[in-house]
Image: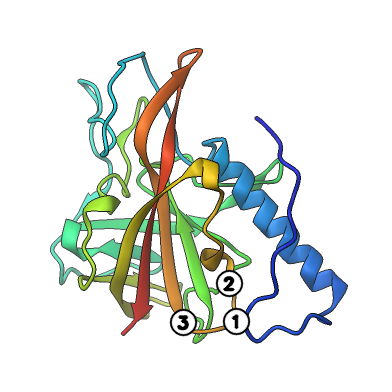
Amino acid sequence: MTSMNPNPVPDEPGTSSAEPVRRRKSRVFATAAIIIAVTVGLLMTYLGSRSGESTAIPPAPTAGQSAPAVLAPADAQMSPATLSLDPLGVQAPIVDASVIDGALTPPDDVSEVGIWLDGAPLDSQTGTTLIAGHVNLAGQGNGALFDLGTVEPGQEIRTSDAAGNSTRWRVTAVVSRAKADGIEESVLAGPDGPRKLAVVTCGGELEFSDGVGNYQDNVYLYADVI
């Protein structure tokens, strides 16, 4: 894993430049952790043989692999702590994202997605909830977020908190951003500010080095609470 030097996070809207040093240090660490994971591909690394192909959408799994995400109709009942991508008919359990060696890391099971614990919790009335997941992994196939880039603005998705209370979200944008450009800072707004949801996975061209593949982009889905 490659390490990066953390860069200070600009003051967020409504945040005084005199905020406590401890809080600012926490945000700097959070920013650095996510940047590390995103830029070196630790968030969503695909392991496989060299194919030489360049695709906008991640490649399909090889023979014998299957998509593990739960397929469900748009009006399906949701279990507690679930992300429901209703336009795709996909539901994924939401678990805590680990921070391993300073990097935000999604769950190993590609059918699950991970929530950033320093962001807004699922039951919050304010702030940005950040959810990340693998696009696919060798031996598991497609992840729950494999087709995230095909969701369109205006469509609705849902989340449920630990108590099973559901929140509806309207997608405002789905964009691809080169990992080399770093993390898009709005997803780090944390528990303060307008209520928003950000879902992130990998996409873009898949490049290999020593048999290890790394997607060159990240796909961001942004949504506002309804």
Give the quadrant of the C terminus: bottom left
Which element is circle 2 on?
loop
Q: Which residue is found at the position 15% from the left and 72% from the top?
A: 75
Q: Which residue is found at the position 22% from the left and 59% from the top?
A: 151
Q: Position of residue 116 (x, y in %)?
A: 56, 61
N-terminal-most mark, 3 or 2: 2
| Residue found at the very far right of the displayed protein | 21
218 lies left or right of 191: left
Q: Which residue is found at the position 53% from the left and 79% from the top?
A: 127
Give the quadrant of the N terminus: top right
Q: Which residue is mark 1?
A: 192
Q: Position of residue 200 (x, y in %)?
A: 42, 54
Q: Which residue is mark 2?
A: 189
**Dot 1 and dot 2 residues touching (CB under 8 Å):** yes
Q: Amino acid at mark 2?
A: Ala
Real-space Cα separation, disc 1 to disc 2, in angstroms: 7 Å
Q: Position of residue 203 (x, y in %)?
A: 36, 41
Q: Amino acid at mark 3?
A: Arg
